[in-house]
Amino acid sequence: MALNYKRGSKFWLTEKGRLYNMAAYLDGNGGPSGSQSLRMALYKDSGGRPGSLVAQSGQLSIAANSGPRWVYFSGASQVALNPGAYWVMVHSGSANAVSRIAS
């Protein structure tokens, strides 16, 4: 992912729920060396765009050339959620654009 970049998707929650963790399917094949810091965040929708921050994970690093896998982010658990639209986002750090959303 590019440096200091946010990528995510909007989703709708139709009933009350609870956030237990956040994960993304990532690899480190976006650059030849180093590592890149990432974190995840959940935002309320505001007119079709991410609005106020609901929850944010801790930061972790993805190493260059690491294979595709589910990466679980800690620090954003046990958050009560009301019905509505939300955005789940991956935030990339400012050094070594090595991480990618894998497919």
Image (cartoon, rainbow, N blue to C red):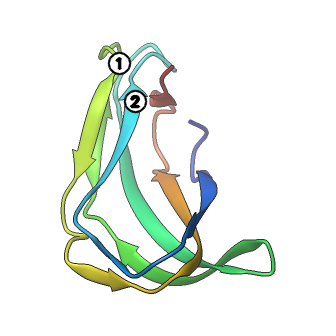
Residue type (three-letter) at the residue carrying disc 1: Pro
Q: Which residue corresponds to the image point at 57% horizontal and 53% vertical from the top-left?
A: 4
Question: Of 63 and 25, which appears nearest the observer?
Answer: 25
Image height of 51 relative to 74, above or below: below
Q: Which residue is mark 1?
A: 68
Residue 99 point in image, percent of width and height: 45, 31
Q: Which residue is mark 2?
A: 26
Question: Of 5 and 46, which appears nearest the observer?
Answer: 46
Which label sits on residue 6? Answer: none
Residue 45 point in image, percent of width and height: 66, 78
Image height of 1 relative to 45, above or below: above
Q: How many marks?
A: 2
Judged from the image, the secondary structure of the residue bearing numbered disc 2 is strand
Residue 60 point in image, percent of width and height: 25, 49
Would residue 69 appear left or right of 91 to someone viewing this image? left
Residue 61 point in image, percent of width and height: 27, 41
Q: Which residue corresponds to the image point at 59% horizontal and 52% vertical from the top-left?
A: 8
Image height of 71 relative to 32, above or below: below
Question: Of 20 and 27, which appears nearest the observer?
Answer: 20
Q: Circle 2: is it few (<14), some (14-19), or many (20+) Cα within 10 Å?
A: some
Judged from the image, the secondary structure of the residue bearing numbered disc 1 is loop
Image height of 57 relative to 69, above or below: below
Q: Which corner quadrant holds the N terminus? A: top right
Q: Which residue corresponds to the image point at 53% horizontal and 73% vertical from the top-left?
A: 14
Would residue 78 appear left or right of 27 to someone viewing this image? left
- Check whether the beta carbons of the residues at disc 1 and disc 2 lie within 8 A of each other: yes
